[in-house]
Image: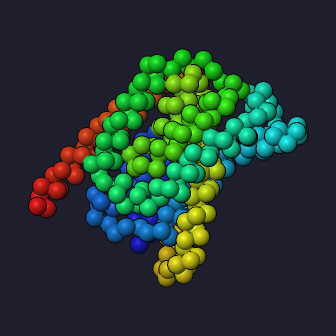
Amino acid sequence: MDLFEAIILAIIQGVTEFLPVSSSAHLNLAPYLFRWPDPGLTFDIALHFGTLIAILIYFYKDWVQIVGQAFGLRAGSDEELRRNRNLFWLLVIGTIPGGIAGLLLEKYAETTLRSPVLTGAMLILFGLIMWLAERLGSKQRDIASVNFRDALVVGCSQALAIVPGVSRSGSTISAAMLMGLDRLAAARFSFLLSTPIIAGAALSAAHKLHQSGGVPPGMKMPMIVGVAVSALVGAGVIALFLNFLRRRTLMPFVAYRVIFGIIVIALALFRASHAG
């Protein structure tokens, strides 16, 4: 992998991991469309660690307060978080479905579920679910009101994100809005909930890399670049997206997902017909 490919893929990861458009769809399709070789496990680790750093950079104060409050400490000054002292344990509960799905379906996610047609279909389907969340969600609750049922429902929706095209942030924000959370609270809870899953995926990939013999020759610099670029881009995108949700709806992302999904399916069918 050359540095140009590493930078492009890291930018794609940093942008799409936190927007409700499916990072896996974009990362799987970029090599497919540009006819680049599969970046492989090593670079996958770099991107996961990059986005983990991004989310910790942006939410480190929240995490300090959330963890501190869980163990009876007075930490942080965010009033919404202060009114939900059980939030840490609710995030633990919400993480469980995604962790189980990752363990059971990981091999399928890396093979069968990477079909471009399936990816395109999921982009469209979950775009329509986002539209329903905008239409049907009451958007009256803040993060202080998150309860056990919310954590379980949003956690189960996060488990669906193992399928490329679903989008972790898209599925969890939609679920949270359908449970009545406002857009900003839904996105904030979604990002907090994604932290342990992203960390677990990064550690799991690192363990596999260690078992396979470590970083291949020539991949150290692309890895460093991938971590740095995806972290910086990701932190910036989180800030921009949350600011966007203070004033705007998810409808631009709904339109993007539907159009992109149609293009993905059309390209896949076109290539399949010409390959035959």
* Numbered circles on residues, count: 0
Q: Nearer the viewer, residue 221 or 44?
A: 44
Answer yes or no: is residue 254 visible.
no
The residue located at (49%, 31%) in the rendering is: 174
Left/right placement of residue 257 relative to residue 54 reads left
The residue located at (40%, 65%) in the rendering is: 5
- Percent across and percent down for residue 211 are 56, 77
Q: Which quarter of the figure has residue 74?
A: top right
Q: Quadrant of the N terminus?
A: bottom left
**The furthest residue to the right:** 73
The residue located at (60%, 36%) in the rendering is: 152
Answer yes or no: is residue 115 visible.
yes
- Percent across and percent down for residue 119 are 33, 48
- Percent across and percent down for residue 55 are 62, 48
Left/right placement of residue 82 relative to residue 255 reads right
Q: How is the image coloured?
A: rainbow
- Percent across and percent down for residue 197 are 59, 51
211 up-or-down from 74: above or below: below
Q: Which quarter of the figure has residue 135?
A: top left
136 up-or-down from 167: above or below: above
Left/right placement of residue 177 relative to residue 90 reads left
Q: Nearer the viewer, residue 105 or 251?
A: 105
Q: Quadrant of the C terminus?
A: bottom left
Q: Nearer the viewer, residue 241 or 178?
A: 178
The residue located at (18%, 50%) in the rendering is: 269
50 up-or-down from 163: above or below: below
